[in-house]
Image (cartoon, helix red, strand yellow):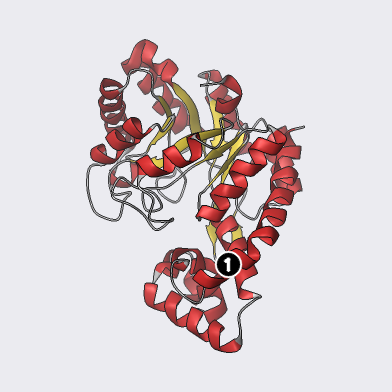
Amino acid sequence: MKKDKISSHLFIGPMSKEIVDVVIDYTNSTKNTLGLIPSRRQIENTGGYVNNWSTDNFCHYVAEKTDNVVLVRDHGGPLQGEKKDNGKASLASDISAGMEILHIDPWKAASTIHEGVHNSLKLIDFCLKKNENILFEVGTEEAIFPYSPKDLDYILVELQAALGTDFDKITHCVIQSGVKISGLQNVGNFDPVRLSEMVKVAHGSGLLSKEHNGDYLSATEIKTRVKLGLDSINIAPEFGVTQTSLILETLTPEELQMAQTVCKKAGKYKKWIPEHLSDDPPLDLIVKTSGHYCFTSEPFKSRIDPVKLSLKERLNKRFDSILNCWE
């Protein structure tokens, strides 16, 4: 893999085929490198909600159109898919399909930091036996398993001690700054000291730092992180919301009501709704936070093409704004 692909600053969730196409076109026209970070629910060896792509079909689709996108499995591991499993079959298919970096994330199933480290090592060993050249991202986001800078140092020291020279196959670790996504906002209490300390821990182990949940951050907020040493950032639901919002602008009142019914029935909005609104979430919030899960259904399906150009313009502008934070 080219070194500039590993050091990409912006990693994007493939919330739809159209977003994937915009990412591909953007990298080809600007020669900037970007990452695509499918979760197991989005794209999986058994198919997912994004274009019903299997992992193999998705990787092939991207690889044949560009060499400027790094393919990263996001949250690979147990309890991360639609069905409960140990995550190994999914990781094996990621490797055979051509994923370049695997985010090893067993932390949903971990009750202690020791268990998380132990299970990370088991999954890394499993993957290296499939492909000794595969690369990794380690750690997880705060909503799954919170840790301190001291904890992160412990994680990396233990991984390095156990892996020896194979520790060099780890390229990124996830740092936490106190934020999360709720509704259509980036919430929580941003802690610049915590972020800075975690970045130093990552760099001290020779790893690139990556923050998840970068959605809805302003350029100023991202620049603050960059000045503190942050190397890269993940953004996912924000771009699905962007596409959904553009589609909603084209709907008639009757179609809007249909969209509300479809999204409410699908129930995918529940993970994004703020707790204080969970008993009776506003219909517009239900649709905006979960419309991208329903793009294969009407009224969304027939309005995908008419907003493609607007989506491309909106996302390209956002990509430029984010990448400029590192200049």
Q: In front: 101, or 186?
A: 101
Residue 135 in the image: state x and y as whole percent: 42, 25
Residue 260 in the image: state x and y as whole percent: 49, 80
Q: In front: 308, or 71?
A: 308
User: In this rendering, would 228 be left or right of 202?
Assistant: right
Residue 191 in view (yes/no): no
User: In this rendering, would 55 be left or right of 172?
Assistant: left
Q: Amino acid at mark 1?
A: Thr
Residue 80 in the image: state x and y as whole percent: 33, 49
Q: In front: 169, or 66?
A: 66
Quadrant in the rendering for residue 321: top right
Quadrant in the rendering for residue 145: top left
Quadrant in the rendering for residue 188: bottom right
The residue sitting at the bottom extreme is 254
Q: In the rendered image, which residue does mark 1 sit on? A: 244
Residue drawn 63% across the image and 67% down it: 306
Residue 254 against residue 299 in the figure, above or below: below
Residue drawn 72% across the image and 40% down it: 224
The number of callouts visible is: 1
Q: Quadrant of the C terminus?
A: top right
- Helix, strand or loop at label 1? It is helix
The residue sitting at the top extreme is 165
Residue 294 against residue 26 in the figure, above or below: below
User: Crowding at label 1, few (<14), some or many (≥20) Cα neighbours within 10 Å?
Assistant: many
Residue 285 in view (yes/no): yes
Residue drawn 53% across the image and 72% down it: 302
Q: In front: 236, or 192?
A: 236
Residue 53 in the image: state x and y as whole percent: 39, 50
